[in-house]
Image: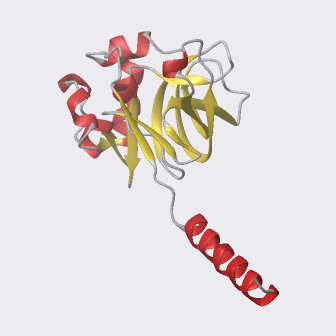
Amino acid sequence: MNKNKLILIMMILGAIGIFFSSLPQQETINYLEADLILYHDFSELKEASDLIIMGTVKESKTWNLELDEPQFSPLIKTDFIVEIEQVILGDAKELSSLTIVMTGGIVDGETTIIRGYPLLTVGEQSIFFLKETDSGRCIVSGGPTGRYVIEEGKVYSLGEKNAEAEAYSQKDLVTNGMSLEAFMSMISDY
């Protein structure tokens, strides 16, 4: 085989390799079912929480949690940095932000989704009922029942704003878009 044919074959094989490497990789989506403690009224939810804050999600970072059981490992987690606008309950007055950790996210083309419990979104302003963890992060008390979205000065339970989370809505925790001022007053009365 002469040198020109060999160069041509190598160029063709290289082009084929570049073509196939540029094709989108198939994404894996894992749906998990949440095993959540759901609270049925604001008194229970408040009592189960170490902190209640109003804040805005500023950034997120997704990571893998390695587990002892390989069939479940790694578990994708996402940390959300939330800027605290107001501390409603608890000892966080000196903090300007905190981290809320949730199961789910995307790492290396693999997506994990908790059914009925959508991840926070950067820019979301909400009232969060939180439980502190040993790692210094917080989790949302009762999952979707402990997160209240603020839109245009009105407060909505997560189930009112997200069809999947609606399955976890508790009738005594639905706010029907009440004013932020009325919601804050109601929480302080419990």
Q: Where is residue 71 in the image (x, y as percent from the top left)?
A: 49, 20
**Quadrant (top left/top right/bottom left/bottom right) for the N terminus:** bottom right
Q: Which residue lies furthest to the left in this view?
A: 171
Residue 54 shown left or right of residue 153 in the figure: right
Q: Position of residue 36 (x, y in %)?
A: 35, 17
Residue 177 showing in the rendered view:
no
Q: In which quarter of the image is residue 149?
A: top left
**Quadrant (top left/top right/bottom left/bottom right) for the C terminus:** top left
Residue 94 shown left or right of residue 32 in the figure: right
Residue 33 showing in the rendered view:
yes
Q: Residue furthest right?
A: 3
Vertically, is 40 above or below 31? above
* Rendering colour mode: secondary structure
Residue 17 shown left or right of residue 49 in the figure: right
Front residue of this view, candidates 91 and 19? 19
> Residue at 64% across / 18% down in the picture?
91
Q: Where is residue 132 in the image (x, y as percent from the top left)?
A: 59, 17
**How many numbered marks does the figure carry?**
0
> Residue at 48% across / 15% down in the picture?
49
Front residue of this view, candidates 120 and 75? 75
Vertically, is 28 above or below 102? below
Q: Where is residue 178 in the image (x, y as percent from the top left)?
A: 28, 41
> Residue at 56% across / 32% down in the picture?
77
Q: Which residue lies furthest to the bottom in this view?
A: 4
Residue 185 shown left or right of residue 77 in the figure: left
Front residue of this view, candidates 1 and 166? 1
Front residue of this view, candidates 14 and 59? 14
